[in-house]
Each structure stands twice: as C-alpha cells, then as structure tokens.
Image: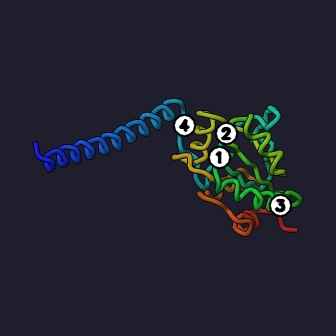
Amino acid sequence: MSKGAIALILGVAVLFGVAGFGVGHLLQQRAAEERLAAAGATSTAEPGQPMPTFTLPDRNGNPVDASAFADQALLVNFWATWCTPCLEEMPALMAVHEAVAPRGGAVLGIALDRAEDVGPFLDELGVTYPIVIADGIEGNRLAQRFGNRNVLLPYSMLVAADGTIVETHFGELTEAEAMDLLEPLLPRE
C-alpha cells in the first residue's frame, strides 16, 4: 500500500473519529437536558412573570426562603467559585448591595457550587451580600427555572419589589450596569 493511500485512510479515520466525538457530545448533552426536564427543570421564568420560589441553605446551612426578599428590588446573581467572570463582578455586586440595601434593594448570590468550596471563598473575598448555595443537579434545575436554560454563568435576574421579573442578563455586570438596572425599581427618597 502506498504512503498516499495510508494517509488517505488515516485522514478518513480521523474525520470519522472527530465526527463521532461531536455526535457523541451532542447526544450526551441532549441526554443531560432530558434528565433535567424529567426532573422538573423548566425554563419558565421570563420578564413579567413572578420570580421562582426556592428554599436554599446559606453558607452555614441555615435555610433561606425566597420570601425573605419580599418587598425588595432584587438582583439575583448565579455564580460559581470556578467562574472567572463571576469572581470579577463580585466586588461590583458588593458595592451595589451596600448602595441599595438602605433604600429597599438587595443583591442575592446563588452559588452553583459545593458548600465546602463556597464558605472559605466568601471569607477570603469578604462578600457582604447574602449568598445561598444550590449544588449539583438541584442548582442546575434552579438556574433553569430562573430562565437560564443552558446554565451559563454569570447570570443575573432583576426582580421588582412585587416579585415580578423585570429583566435577565447573561454575562458579567459592572457596578454602573447593575445600578442602572436596580435604580428605577428602588423607592424614591
């Protein structure tokens, strides 16, 4: 067999291997989506609808219910310790929380991470806003209920004081962007 024929056979084999990997990856992703859907994960949260309810543990394991944030303009932010853009936006979210808390607003972080990773991280960074933890499949289902179908991070949702979703945002927020989102929902001084 000639070198050209061997190269052609190897090229075709590599092409089929790459195509097979791509198809296999798509099939795995689809299977994961079907498992989440079967477990009750639906992307129902959209602007104009009520914020999904939840009860999640804080960093100390104490349950925090969504109703604890009733009557507040709220910026809900999904993040994880391994997400670089999430970590880069945290100082801005701390500044926003400090600015809006006295005026009836809040930032709430939902960590899609393991509790044992979140606590030391929050200590190191000195996070000042409330954080709850939604680990594993529960966290993915919650993110999807909040309208984040593909569980991309960071992901934020703006909620009016009456509990109605106003807007969603994929990607990192600056302090100015977050303030621009929350400011119109705060009570006038």
Residue labelled with disc 1: 82
Report helix, strand or loop for mark 4: loop
Circle nearer the viewer, 3 or 2: 2
Q: Provide residue 91's location: percent of width, then percent of height.
A: 77, 59
Residue labelled with disc 2: 113
Disc 1 or 3, which lies upstream in sequence? 1
Residue labelled with disc 3: 100
Circle nearer the viewer, 1 or 4: 1
Residue labelled with disc 4: 41
Q: Provide residue 57's location: percent of width, then percent of height.
A: 76, 34
User: Pointer 1 and pointer 2: residues touching (CB < 8 Å)?
Assistant: yes
User: Pointer 1 and pointer 4: residues touching (CB < 8 Å)?
Assistant: no
Residue 115 is labelled as none
User: Pointer 3 and pointer 2: residues touching (CB < 8 Å)?
Assistant: no
Report helix, strand or loop for mark 3: helix
Inter-mark Cα distance, 2 to 4 = 18 Å
